[in-house]
Image (cartoon, rainbow, N blue to C red):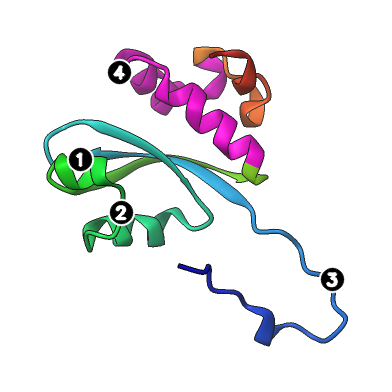
Amino acid sequence: MPMPTNRSHRHPGAPVSPPRWSVYILETNDGRYYTGVATDPQARFRAHEAGRGSRAVRMAGGPRRLLWQHGGLERGEALRLERAIKGLRRPAKERLMAEGLAAVGLGEAGASAGDSG
């Protein structure tokens, strides 16, 4: 399904900046943590609620709440950070949400995320 664009709202000839990406962690209805990436985490959460999200979230009973997000990333940075977070155990994810990326060795904006996995 194509991503909607806002091209009709820009002036002709205006530069198009790439969308900024976020990494998010949500809690599912059965208590699991799910990590994903999106350009709009709140809209993605609503998609999960409507059953249009990932199979993992549907199998876990749907999303309960959005717990954490880190934005302002380029797509590649977001995907690397997502992969690094998915490799963490639950206590480390809880520490990340409470204390930030540096608390689990991921540095600012996932700069070292590609090194952990």
Q: Which residue is mark 1?
A: 28
Which is the main secondary structure of the residues drawn in magenta? helix
Assign a secondary structure to mark 2. Answer: loop
Considering only order in the chain, which callout, 3 or 2, is on the residue closer to the N terminus? Answer: 3
Residue in the foreground of this view, choosing between 68 and 31: 31
Give the percent coordinates (x, y) of residue 65: 25, 46
Bounds of the magenta span?
76-103
Assign a secondary structure to mark 3. Answer: loop
85 falls in the magenta region: yes
Residue 90 image label: 4
| Image quadrant in which you'd find residue 9 | bottom right
Asked if residue 3 is positioned above or below residue 84 in the image, the reply reads below
Considering only order in the chain, which callout, 4 or 3, is on the residue closer to the N terminus? Answer: 3
User: 89 left or right of 77?
Assistant: left
Assign a secondary structure to mark 4. Answer: helix
User: What distance separates the C-alpha of mark 2 from that of mark 1?
Assistant: 12 Å
Residue in the foreground of this view, choosing between 35 and 103: 35
Whether label 3 touches label 4, CB < 8 Å: no
Residue shown at the point (84%, 71%) measured from the top left: 15
User: What distance separates the C-alpha of mark 1 from that of mark 4?
Assistant: 13 Å
Considering only order in the chain, which callout, 4 or 1, is on the residue closer to the N terminus? Answer: 1
Give the percent coordinates (x, y) of residue 17: 76, 63
Q: Which residue is mark 2?
A: 53
Give the percent coordinates (x, y) of residue 64: 19, 46
Whether label 1 touches label 4, CB < 8 Å: no
Residue in the foreground of this view, choosing between 59 and 33: 59
User: 111 left or right of 56?
Assistant: right
Front: mark 2 or 3? 2
Q: Which residue is mark 3?
A: 15
